[in-house]
Image: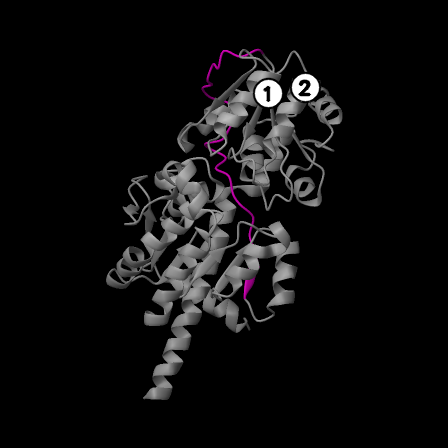
């Protein structure tokens, strides 16, 4: 005899995917370097094999995307950060460009979800998307699936805030965050599903890009913002201790000019480049490097680590529990705040071939596995909501 939950899962799997899923991220198609943006694109593409999926995005980014109707944060950042305006608006908010994005997308996205009836809303842009989903749920009872990408950053500040929206299904990236969630909100449904990587796209074999830099080449993929947790300056300092090594910074952000100046000062013009590429070009970028590093602190997960490993690169990373879980035997962990120790780790890893170890380790995070977990969770979430609605109708009848 099978359990009620197993029977329900089997029942929904036997239906041929007539459900509609709406994914929301108004920066997608505008910002190509953010982890949550990449996640939204990949999730849309993968779930489209099982459902009717629409991605409400900031710009065209594939056959499933539809303009969200608001103003992406990238379009207002430079204007807002002009000296006179910055002094005024930053008194009220640390990231006014994000608030503008959330506010201008609220009504267009709510209207779209109400007119084009959807069976589940999957916001990927933090509290802005959750507010949209919560408004639609209040009107039509549409369930919400949400993945918390910030994990326990700042003692779980974002997670605590987002739990106020009570998503019907919450996904976190690791067991530690799941335990934290159950402690502060015991009734919240929570599942642990890591981020995924496309092992057919990110491979050691294939075309590369010639950057014209001295080899070997260390790659760091991160948003260029001095106020976030990526700590790109630590990678610059470490590479500066290795005269024979060059650094490729792949990303964009408000402090790009600052990092350009730092690299020019510490490395010289022939030992660094700062570039931005669309997601489709990233496999070539990884294949063009010899080492991957990201010295962030309190990284919630780190999609770039598994993309690098899938591409056959060894990794040098911060020594903490999350990085050890992700990277395993595919790299070296060290005190990245010490430039000499960090540089020694980079030097040491160049002496060994990690390609097969890295590739094998990446198989744990295959999108083929991750997408199936999301499919099953979506089906279960929708089915539970259908059962609740059915029970209400019976009571009212």
Q: Is residue 88 visible?
A: yes
Task: Residue 280: give x, y in percent of width and height.
Answer: 40, 31
Q: Is residue 360 above or below residue 13?
A: above
Q: Is residue 206 magenta?
A: yes
Q: Secondary structure at mark 2?
A: loop
Which residue is nearer to you in this view: 369 or 10? 369
Q: Dot 2, crowdedness within 10 Å: few (<14), some or many (≥20)?
A: few
What number is the disc on residue 290?
1
Separation of marks 2 and 1 at Cα, in angstroms? 8 Å
Q: Is residue 139 above or below residue 393?
A: above
What number is the disc on residue 350?
2
The residue lying at 43 percent from left, 50 percent from top is 125
**Disc 2 and disc 1 in contact, CB within 8 angstroms:** yes
Task: Residue 335: give x, y in percent of width and height.
Answer: 74, 33
Q: Is 56 positioned to the left or the right of 273 in the image?
A: left
Q: Is residue 289 visible?
A: no
Q: Which residues are magenta?
A: 189-214
Disc nearer the start of the sequence (2/1): 1
Examine the image and state in which quarter residue 31 appears. Answer: top left
The residue lying at 41 percent from left, 39 percent from top is 84
Q: Is 150 positioned to the left or the right of 36 in the image?
A: right
Q: Secondary structure at mark 1?
A: loop
Q: Is residue 136 above or below residue 148?
A: below
């Amino acid at each position: 005899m099978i359990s009620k939950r197993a029977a329900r899962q089997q029942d929904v799997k036997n239906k041929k995917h007539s459900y509609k899923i709406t994914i929301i991220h108004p920066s997608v198609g505008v910002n190509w370097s953010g982890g949550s943006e990449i996640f939204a694109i990949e999730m849309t593409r993968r779930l489209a094999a099982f459902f009717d999926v629409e991605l409400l995005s900031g710009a065209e980014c594939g056959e499933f995307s539809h303009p969200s109707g608001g103003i992406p944060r990238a379009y207002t950042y430079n204007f807002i950060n002009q000296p006179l305006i910055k002094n005024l608006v930053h008194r009220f908010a640390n990231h006014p460009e994000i608030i503008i994005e959330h506010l201008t997308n609220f009504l267009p996205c709510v209207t779209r979800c109400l007119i084009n009836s959807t069976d589940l809303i999957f916001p990927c842009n933090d509290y802005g998307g959750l507010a949209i989903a919560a408004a639609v749920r209040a009107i039509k009872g549409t369930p919400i699936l949400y993945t918390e990408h910030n994990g326990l950053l700042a003692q779980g500040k974002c997670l605590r805030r987002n739990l106020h929206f009570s998503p019907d299904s919450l996904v976190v990236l690791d067991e530690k965050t799941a335990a934290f969630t159950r402690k502060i909100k015991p009734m919240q449904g929570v599942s642990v599903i890591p981020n995924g990587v496309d092992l057919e796209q990110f491979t050691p074999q294939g075309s590369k890009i010639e950057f014209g830099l001295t080899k070997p080449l260390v790659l760091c993929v991160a948003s260029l913002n001095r106020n976030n947790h990526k700590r790109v300056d630590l990678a610059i300092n470490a590479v500066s201790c290795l005269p024979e090594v060059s650094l490729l910074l792949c990303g964009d952000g408000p402090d790009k000019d600052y990092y350009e100046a730092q690299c020019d000062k510490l490395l010289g013009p022939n030992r660094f480049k700062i570039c931005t590429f669309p997601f489709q070009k990233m496999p070539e970028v990884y294949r063009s490097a010899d080492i991957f590093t990201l010295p962030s602190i309190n990284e919630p997960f780190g999609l770039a680590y598994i993309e690098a490993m899938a591409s056959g690169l060894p990794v040098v990373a911060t020594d903490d529990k999350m990085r050890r879980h992700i990277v395993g035997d595919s790299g070296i962990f060290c005190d990245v705040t010490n430039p000499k120790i960090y540089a020694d780790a980079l030097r040491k890893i160049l002496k060994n071939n990690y390609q097969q170890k890295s590739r094998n380790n990446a198989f744990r995070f295959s999108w083929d596995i991750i997408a199936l977990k999301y499919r099953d969770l979506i089906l279960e979430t929708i089915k539970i909501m259908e059962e609740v609605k059915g029970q209400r109708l019976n009571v009212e009848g």
